[in-house]
Every structure is written in C-alpha cells, then in structure tokens.
C-alpha cells in the first residue's frame, strides 16, 4: 500500500487508487505523516474537524479507522490500535512525503561531499513526486501542509544551488525569473537569479534584479535586503577574473577514504575561514586525498583552485610569491609582510580553494592563510599542526586491508590479484598498507608480467632490500622518511638509530620518544592489561633505520681505511 500526500490525499494499492471518504482521508493523512509512530485520537479529530470536534468524535474516528482497514484489504494489519490512538505501519518509501524528506537529506549529504550532480539528481526526483499543493483536500492539516510547502521551496532552492555549482547558470535564468515573480519577497530566489545573471555575463541585469527585490522589501515590509543578498550585490559589483587553477590530476586509482573525503568536504565548505589539516605517516596518501577532494569541490569554488608544494622546507616569502603570481600579480613586493598583506587582500571574499601541500609546521603555514570570507584551505603534512587556529584535523591511518587489496588489484589487474589471494594480502601488509608503497609494488608487478605476486613477496620479506624493492620511478617511500628523520634533534636521531638493531626499549627518555611519535617514526600502542603505552616502529620505518645504520657503518669503515 502507498499513501500520497504531496497533492490530493490518495491511498493506492497495486491496482491503483482506492476510494476513501473525506473524513477517513483526513485520518489517513494524519496517520501517514507520522507513519511508524502512534497518533492520538485527539489529533486525528483535529485533522477531521479542524477546531471543535463533536461529542461523538471518538466513535466517528473509530468508524473512519474501520473504513480504512476495509480499504487496506489484505494489508489491514498495517493499521494498528495503539492507545491513545492508532499507528500506521508503513515504511517511509510507501509515503511520498516521507520519501521526499529522505531524498532531500541524501541530497544534503551529496552536497557536503561535493557531489553537486548527485545532489541535483536526488532533488529532481524528490520534487518530481509533487502533484499539486500538499494535503490540498484536508483543510484540518493546514499547519502540516504549510510546513511541507516550505520544505518544497527549500528543496527547490537547494536544487538550483546545485545546478549553479554545475555551471548551468544561463539555463536557470528563465526558471528563476518565474520563481521571483511568484515569490517576490523570498530573498534566496532573488539572490540565485542575480548569481545566474552575473555568471551568464549579464551584470546590469543582475544589479537590476537587486534593485527590484530591494524596492519590494522596502515597500512591502519596510526592510532592507538581508546580509546574503547584499553580499551577492557586492560580488556582482566587484567581479574579478578567476585565479589560475593549478591542481594536479585527480589520482585515477584513488581508493577508499570515503569517510575522510566527506569530512574534508564538509569542513572546507562550512566555516567563514575553513582550514583543514590532513596529516599522517609519509606515504599514507595525504596529498592524494587533498587532490581528490579538491577535484570534487572545484564547482563549489568558482574563483579557482591554487595548489603549491611547500616541500617541508620552503620559506613563506617564496611561497607567497608563487601564490601571488597565480592570482595575477606579475611582480610581488619584496618583503614578507607586504606580500602577506597583498595576498590577504587579493583572496578576501573570493571563493578560492587553496592547497598547501607538505607543510612542516605552523610557522610555515600561518603567513599563507588567505583573507576572510570565501577561501577554503587544505593543508597536508606529516605534522599535526594543532596550533593552527580554528583548523579541522583529519588524521589518516594506513588503508584498511580491503582497500589496500582493491588498490593493488586496480593496478595489477583483478584476475592476477585474485589468483594469489594470500600473496596479495601478505604483499600489502609488507607495504604497511601505505598507498604510496602499495602503488610502487603494484607498478613493479605491472612492469613484470612474468612475475608472480609471491615472487615480489619473497623479495620484500628481506628487510635489508625492502625499500629498494618499493622504489619505482617517482614512487618511493624513502624521501618522506628521510625528511622526517632530518627534522629530528641529534638526540632523537640517536634513539632512532637503535631501531635497526632491536636495542630500542621503553627506557628511552620520554621527550625523545614523543619526538619520534610526532615525526611519525614511532607508533603508540596501549597495553590492554596494564594500560601502559608501548612504542614500536612500523615495518618500513624499521627498514629505513637499518639502511641508515648500514650507510653509517660503511662510511665509518671507509674513513678508517683512508
């Protein structure tokens, strides 16, 4: 059975509409609005008689319920007596108003994820279920009908916003013109019309649309336009060319990280100056996640995307020069303060997405934060940068086993990976389930079609050669590990050296252990029994320590021989 509320109220079965009298129809509508929850007889009576019910209201409501049960036929058990009233046991999919609300929520999630196309599709489906005014033949539910109508208008605004983000401005102008005529005091429709006109190259028409809505608001209500409408007018008056977009390609084999991508998208589109820090071990895929999220969010930042590598050691003066040139400044001023001031002025109020890749610390990042009111910032690095004010932190762990195996299969071929499931699992574990290491191993296998996965597993099992086996072209975990090691104090490097021969233990000074943890060269494991912390190096970190020790020993032997 289905109940339709978004228009004249209808009860339908597999054959079509089922006749229901007007009072029973009002009872059905009230029950369907709260499907799955008890509805009191008192509320049902208000739906039927609006204000003052007759003395026989309880008896008449019982009669309406009996009539509905007859109309439900074999499905009559769906209408349950549940003191102090009745309950309709229908799923949300069977009530069009509830299905509409569910699709709207799904669309909001898609929008936060940066999937404007998916959001627009869901909202079109939701709005397509409307057949007229909600509950139009049940006057006793006028408040509920008004609420549904407001939800419809909000969904329509949301759908138009998604279409604007998809670059469909010119197509929306006729629809928005009609909506503004039908809703002369609804500011968001007028703001969307102004945006659509401006993005279609019709700035004078956009400013004229602002004048019309302002005259209507002042004339009808005695109120000036709200802050959002005034902001849009300022944007139209000060239209600037988009910045140079410099994003790297979206990784074609990007795998997993759905929850992390959604969190990044939600955070970077929700605050006045959104800053998201993505951190994790070298090779964990922070850069790949930032790039992937940026590609999904490009339509949300129509003024452009700026991407720059900080290479862990780049000076803010140099980086600001690069960013200003992307923003159209041919000759940036020489001083750091002057460059930072000009950068903030050039970015303030603009819907830019700025990616600062491979940052070392707050001192490096703070001068690179843009002006307020529009830009979003993604920062990646090994350090957590917890002192950045207002930042949202997304810390990446190695891939789950399933995602690591999926990444391997995408590169080497599903048939090849499926033929050796145990070797595939062992291979990704030897890579510490780091995306960079798995990609390197998979790329080697792709270039050696005569190798079995087990052949590479055999090679990786030797810790003295593992890092060498995981270097393939630009895919190499060593540089990230080396940069983390280079940032350590001399004392912490001494502790790190002891990872290679197994002499490292909990007796090391706490401050040095924490320094290694901060550099992502040690993992913290808390014992379940005692609650004490233990420290251990990940496998590839231990391999790197062995390499460093070997190089030191060889260097010392050479010096002695000379």
Image: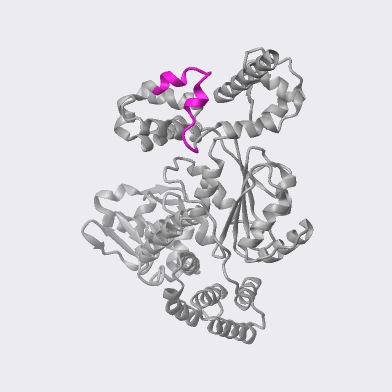
Quarter of the image for residue 22 reads bottom left
Instruction: Give the residue at x 36% y 34%.
Output: 446
* Residue 52 horizontal/vertical position (percent): 50, 68
Q: What is the residue that sits farthest to the left in this orientation?
A: 15
Instruction: Give the residue at x 63% y 87%.
Output: 219
* Residue 321 horizontal/vertical position (percent): 68, 57
Tell me the magenta residue range: 456-474
Quick check: can you spot residue 56?
A: yes
Locate the C terminus and report the quarter of the image it occupies: top right
User: Which of 36/358 is in front?
Assistant: 358
As drawn, is 273 to the left or to the right of 95? Answer: right
* Residue 503 horizontal/vertical position (percent): 66, 12
As drawn, is 237 to the left or to the right of 341? Answer: left
As drawn, is 341 to the left or to the right of 398? Answer: right
Total labels drawn: 0
User: Which of 118/129 is in front?
Assistant: 118
On screen, residue 68 above or below 22: above
Queried whether the magenta region covers residue 276, the answer comes back as no
Q: What is the residue that sits farthest to the front in this orientation?
A: 562
Locate the N terminus and report the quarter of the image it occupies: bottom left
Quick check: can you spot residue 58?
A: no
Instruction: Give the residue at x 30% y 64%.
Output: 20
Instruction: Give the residue at x 66% y 16%.
Output: 530
Queried whether the magenta region covers residue 470, the answer comes back as yes
Color scheme of the displayed model: one colour
* Residue 229 horizontal/vertical position (percent): 61, 74
On screen, residue 559 above or below 354: above
On screen, residue 232 above or below 457: below
């Amino acid at each position: 059975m289905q109940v339709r509320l978004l228009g004249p109220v209808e009860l339908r079965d597999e054959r079509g509409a089922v006749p229901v009298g007007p009072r029973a129809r009002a009872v059905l509508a009230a029950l369907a609005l709260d499907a799955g929850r008890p509805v009191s007889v008192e509320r049902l009576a208000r739906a039927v008689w609006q204000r003052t019910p007759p003395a026989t209201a309880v008896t008449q409501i019982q009669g309406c319920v009996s009539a509905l049960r007859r109309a439900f036929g074999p499905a009559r058990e769906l209408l349950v007596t549940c003191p102090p009233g009745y309950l309709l046991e229908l799923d949300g999919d069977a009530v069009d108003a509830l299905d509409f609300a569910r699709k709207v929520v799904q669309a909001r999630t898609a929008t936060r994820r940066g999937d404007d196309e998916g959001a627009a599709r869901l909202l079109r489906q939701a709005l397509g279920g409307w057949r007229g005014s909600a509950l139009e033949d049940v006057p006793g539910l006028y408040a509920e009908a008004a609420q549904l109508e407001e939800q419809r208008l909000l969904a329509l605004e949301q759908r138009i916003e998604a279409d604007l983000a998809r670059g469909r401005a010119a197509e929306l102008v006729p629809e928005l013109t009609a909506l503004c005529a039908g809703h002369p005091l609804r500011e968001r429709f007028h703001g969307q019309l102004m945006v659509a006109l401006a993005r279609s190259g019709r700035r004078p028409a956009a400013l004229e649309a602002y004048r019309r809505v302002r005259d209507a608001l002042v004339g009808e209500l005695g109120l000036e336009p709200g802050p959002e409408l005034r902001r849009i007018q300022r944007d139209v008056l000060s239209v600037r060319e988009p910045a140079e977009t410099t994003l790297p390609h979206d990784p074609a084999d990007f795998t997993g990280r759905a929850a992390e991508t959604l969190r990044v998208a939600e955070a970077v589109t929700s605050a006045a100056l959104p800053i998201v820090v993505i951190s994790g071990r070298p090779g964990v895929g922070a850069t790949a996640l930032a790039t992937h999220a940026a590609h999904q969010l490009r339509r949300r930042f129509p003024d452009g995307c700026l991407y720059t590598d900080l290479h862990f050691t780049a000076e803010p003066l140099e980086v600001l020069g690069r960013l200003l040139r992307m923003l159209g400044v041919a000759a940036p001023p020489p001083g750091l303060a002057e460059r930072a001031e000009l950068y903030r002025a050039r970015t303030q109020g603009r819907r830019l997405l700025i990616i600062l890749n491979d940052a070392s610390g707050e001192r490096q990042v703070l001068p690179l934060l843009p002006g307020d009111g529009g830009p979003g910032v993604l920062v990646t690095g090994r350090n957590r940068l917890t002192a950045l004010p207002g930042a949202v932190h997304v810390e990446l762990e190695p891939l789950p086993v399933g995602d690591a195996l999926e990444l391997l299969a995408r590169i080497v071929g599903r048939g090849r990976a499926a033929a050796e499931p145990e070797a595939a699992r062992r291979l990704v574990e030897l890579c510490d389930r780091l995306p960079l290491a798995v990609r390197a191993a998979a790329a080697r296998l792709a270039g050696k079609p005569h190798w079995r996965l087990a052949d590479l597993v055999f090679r990786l099992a030797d810790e003295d050669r593992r890092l060498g086996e995981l270097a393939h072209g630009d895919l190499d975990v060593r540089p990230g590990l080396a940069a983390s090691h280079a940032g350590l104090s001399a004392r912490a490097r001494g502790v790190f050296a002891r990872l290679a021969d197994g002499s490292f233990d909990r007796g090391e000074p706490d401050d040095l252990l924490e320094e290694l943890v901060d550099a992502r060269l040690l993992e913290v494991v808390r014992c379940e029994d005692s609650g004490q912390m233990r420290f251990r190096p990940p496998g590839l970190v231990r391999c790197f320590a062995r390499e460093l020790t070997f190089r030191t020993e060889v260097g010392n032997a050479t010096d002695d021989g000379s």
